[in-house]
């Protein structure tokens, strides 16, 4: 998620604002410290321009 966000030129703060989330929550998601709901995963996918499947598969599969 972090790589895609950076490729899009978005800061954690900008992505969080777009999603209506707190920046610290976005950071925790990127570090794997929080588990997002399917609703949040869906919103992240739309904002980042990727599929939900892409976000849900493990790093080793990319």
Image (cartoon, rainbow, N blue to C red):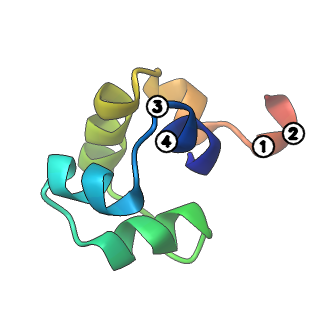
The residue positioned 17% from the left and 46% from the top of the image is 18
Task: Give the alpha-carbon distance from disc 4 to disc 1, as whole Å.
Answer: 15 Å
Proximity of marks 3 and 4: CB atoms separated by less than 8 Å: yes
Residue indicated by mark 4: 5
Q: Which residue is mark 3?
A: 8
Which residue is the site of mark 2? 60
Q: Residue at x 56, y 77 (%)?
A: 33
**Which residue lies most toward the left here?**
20
Crowding at dot 2, Cα within 10 Å, few <14 / some 14-19 / many 20+, comes out as few
Task: Kindly state the secondary structure of the residue where label 3 is placed.
Answer: loop
Estimate how packed mark 1 is, as few (under 14), some (14 to 19) or many (20 or more) residues with alpha carbons within 10 Å. Answer: few
Whole-number angstrom distance, CA of label 1 to CA of label 3:
19 Å
Q: Is residue 18 above or below residue 54?
A: below
Give whichever of 28, 42 is nearer the camera.
28
Which residue, as the protein is rendered here, is positioned at the far right?
60
Residues at badges 2 and 1 in contact (C-beta under 8 Å)?
yes
Q: Secondary structure at mark 4?
A: helix
Mark 2–mark 1 distance (CA, rounded to whole Å) = 4 Å
Q: Pointer 2 and pointer 3: residues touching (CB < 8 Å)?
A: no
Question: Which residue in the structure is indicated by mark 1?
Answer: 59
- Mark 2 and mark 3: span between their CA atoms? 22 Å
Closer mark to the observer between disc 2 and disc 3: 3
In the picture, measured across the screen, residue 51 lies left or right of residue 6, that is left
The mark nearer the N terminus, 4 or 1, is 4
User: In terms of sequence position, does the residue under pointer 1 or pointer 3 come before the other?
Assistant: 3
């Amino acid at each position: 998620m972090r790589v895609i966000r950076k490729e899009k030129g978005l800061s954690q703060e900008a992505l969080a604002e777009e999603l209506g989330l707190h920046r610290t929550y976005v950071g925790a998601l990127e570090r794997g410290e929080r588990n997002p709901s399917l609703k949040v995963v869906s919103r992240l996918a739309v904002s980042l321009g990727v599929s939900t499947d892409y976000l849900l598969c493990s790093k080793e599969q990319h």
